[in-house]
Amino acid sequence: MSLSFYNDLTRKKEPFVPISEGKVSFYSCGPTVYDYFHIGNARPFIVFDVLRRYMESIGYDVTFVQNFTDVDDKMINRANAEGITVAQLAERFIAEYHKDAAALGIRPATIAPRATEHIGEIIEIIRRIIDNGHAYTVPVGADNDVYFDVRSYPPYGKLSRQSLDELEAGARVDVGESKRDPLDFALWKAAKPGEPSWESPWGRGRPGWHIECSAMSSKYLGDSIDIHSGGADLIFPHHENEIAQSEAANGGEKPFVHTWLHNGFLLINKEKMSKSLGNFMTARAALEKYPPLAIRLFMLSAHYRSPINFAPEGLEQAAGGVERLRNCWSAVESAKDSAAAVGDSHPQGDSHPQDDAFLTTLAEIDRRFHEALDDDFNTAAALGAVFDAVTLINTYLRGEEKSAACLEAAEAAMRRFDDIMGVIGITDENPAESQDAEAKEIRRLIDEREEARRAKDFARADEIRDALAARGITLEDTRHGTTWKRK
């Protein structure tokens, strides 16, 4: 199966065909850095991080751009309230974003541009929009606002599937705005006292929110890009406005984005997150309550386009899933060590009939994993395949007869699923490396326990078992030797 996505622009599932063969230009909306990002934002950050990882794992060269909005009304208000500059506020919360993103296993973007570092590009794209007849200026004292003329762009509404009449019914004019039509939106805002501002052809001012993404995506990815992603709440007006201003700037010669992807809402106890409901939660607060890998696995447990309910029972189940993955790797390592310690009853390379069935089933599970992700990035089904593999491997390792060949196959399978866990982002390290020191220490203690038992020093043997149990390690004595797993 070839890679396909449900494109929110066309409202249908389509095969993915990149603009340039083997390369993917991918823009994803980043945070406005006036505070810690909330747990709802964590969902697109995690989901589209995994999509990027998967596309790289199947051979694409992905340029992933995620911006920081580092100037807007919320930032100005908070900076003024704290008596600091907007730039200082931005520096603080960009650093905090990186801390929380790293804890959640979110890789840094290929390019992470800031709006205030691209004022020149923003001014240039606004100039092109005006020159093409799609924007106008409104005097505000000695300076000017610049507005996009929505009615000059007939395709407006094509992403959100709303007509101009429907949009006009819900439109409003904010205090101080002098735009011609309630639907028009600001590209440039005239300077106000106490706000950061920059020189422009229209006087001093600062960019509107929507224009920054158009300017930065075109700078780093070109006028037409493969994928643009974000939360469903951004479809209108943010992404609708991005399309209009970007295509107005290039004269309508190219589509701004070929494939639009939007994740569903994250609910808190089955309600939309809202400060007024008292269920608002930052990612930082969530990380203080739940293991970070459990949060990550939870976010992938539903299809990205579906809503997902952030509740304790779901997080506990995800934490158990992370532990199952880790325990499976430990069981394979332990079985290998035991076989080497006592000597396998079958010559190296021999296999049993069940070995072939084991390997065949693993290959089938691997195929299911890829089919799930190729089919509109179905992480829920892909995780189902991963846990089927864990069950299969654990069942095999509990068997009494294990050939050397199949133990090697089990290890190879876990290394393959380590690659898969790298795609999922459950671990960025190779388990064979990250757990190597601990595994060696556990094996050393097990060997010491075996020596104590042979010497009939049962007090020492029990002391070692109890010490390992206190670390969450359970021992199982079999005729092939002692195996271990985490509780």
Image: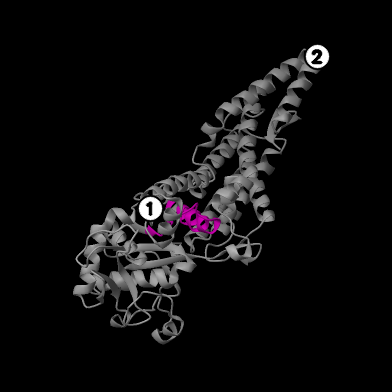
Q: Which residues are magenta?
A: 27-53
Q: What percent of the width, then of the height, locates residue 444?
A: 64, 21
Colour scheme of the rendered structure: one colour
Q: What percent of the width, then of the height, locates residue 287?
A: 58, 47
Q: Amino acid at mark 1?
A: Val
Q: Secondary structure at mark 1?
A: helix
Compare residues 422 and 32 and report the one nearer the observer.
32
Residue 204 on the magenta span: no
Q: Amino acid at mark 2?
A: Lys
- Is 287 rendered above or below residue 484? below
- Is 301 rendered above or below residue 425? below
Which is closer to the viewer, label 2 or label 1?
A: 1
Q: Quadrant of residue 116?
A: bottom left
Q: Who's the residue at 40% across and 49% down the image?
A: 84
Q: Residues within 10 Å of mark 2 (few under 14, many from 20)?
A: few
Q: Which residue is mark 2?
A: 456
Q: What percent of the width, then of the height, locates residue 320?
A: 67, 47
Q: Which residue is mark 1?
A: 86
Give whichever of discs 2 and 1 has the lower sequence position: 1
The residue furthest top is: 455
Q: Secondary structure at mark 2?
A: loop
Is any part of residue 22 visible from this angle? no
105 to the left or right of 334: left
